[in-house]
Amino acid sequence: MVGMSIKDTSQDQKWLLHVDGSSTTQGSGAGIVITTPQGEDLEFAIKFDFKASNNEAEYEALVIGMRMAHEAGARHLLAYSDSQLVVKQVEGTYEVKEESMIQYLQQITDLKTKFHHFQIIQIPREENAKADSLSKLASSLEDCRIRHITIHYLPEARTPLAVQPITTGEDWRTPIIKWIEEGYSLKIDGRLPGSRHEPLAS
């Protein structure tokens, strides 16, 4: 239930979710930051292959973020968004009239049942800086498909680059990454999985 408090006990591990959506003339996308109970962040910039208004992008970000958090094992989720419209509509404070918003809200209502506790809170944009930056990155790029990137570290000036290999072992992030990779490979009509254009998986 939205607004239900999350108990900080050993059995109730609290996960945090920061989301933001962006729609520009170059496209639209979402920024998602999932924080584990251990304080580890996993950040995503997701480019949409379909047109979306700013409000639709905000809803897409929340829906996809909730799905990702659940896939990662979250059952006690505290979500943050700087969209007053989305937060108030999810809380039930604002009336929902547009058909697209009604469909998004239904998906969120269904997703909430997968969590033991769920709460959404509106925060100022400056407190949502990571998700905001990621959403702007995703919406501004013409091609933001998944790719493998080698990270180089420069320990000091004029020394050879020390390459830090990316590990391939599985951890709590594995199902999320698999979900994204499979989603991109299984896109239907250029639409992302988890959007209002695709039914919820049981």
Image: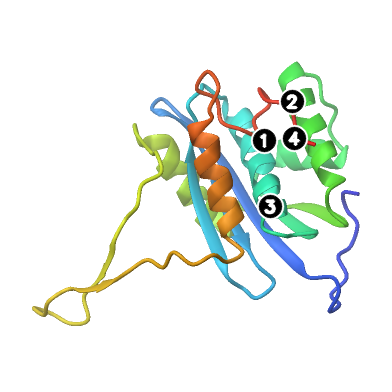
Q: Name the residue under label 4.
A: 201
Q: Which of marks 1 and 3 is nearer the N terminus?
A: 1
Residue 49, label in figure? none
Relative depth, front residue between 70 and 78: 70
Q: Name the residue under label 2.
A: 101
Residue at point 54% right, 65% down?
170
Dot 2: what SS? helix
Q: Does residue 51 sit above or below 165 in this rendering? A: above
Of the residues shown, which amino acid type is indicated by label 2? Met
State whether residue 22 appears in this view. Answer: no
Of the residues shown, which amino acid type is indicated by label 4? Ala
Residue neighbourhood size for the residue with mark 2, other residues' Cα within 10 Å, grouped as few (<14), some (14–19), many (≥20): some
Q: Mark 1 points at which residue?
A: 59
Comparing labels 4 and 2, the label whose residue is closer to the camera: 4
Residue 71, label in figure? 3
Asked whether the residues under the numbered discs 1 and 3 touch, taking CB atoms below 8 Å apart as contact, a structural biologist would say: no
Residue at point 69% right, 45% down?
67
Dot 1: what SS? helix
Task: Measuring from the top left, give residue 88's x and y in whole percent.
Answer: 80, 40
Q: Earlier in the sequence, mark 3 or mark 4?
A: 3
Q: Distance between the residues labelled 3 and 4?
A: 12 Å
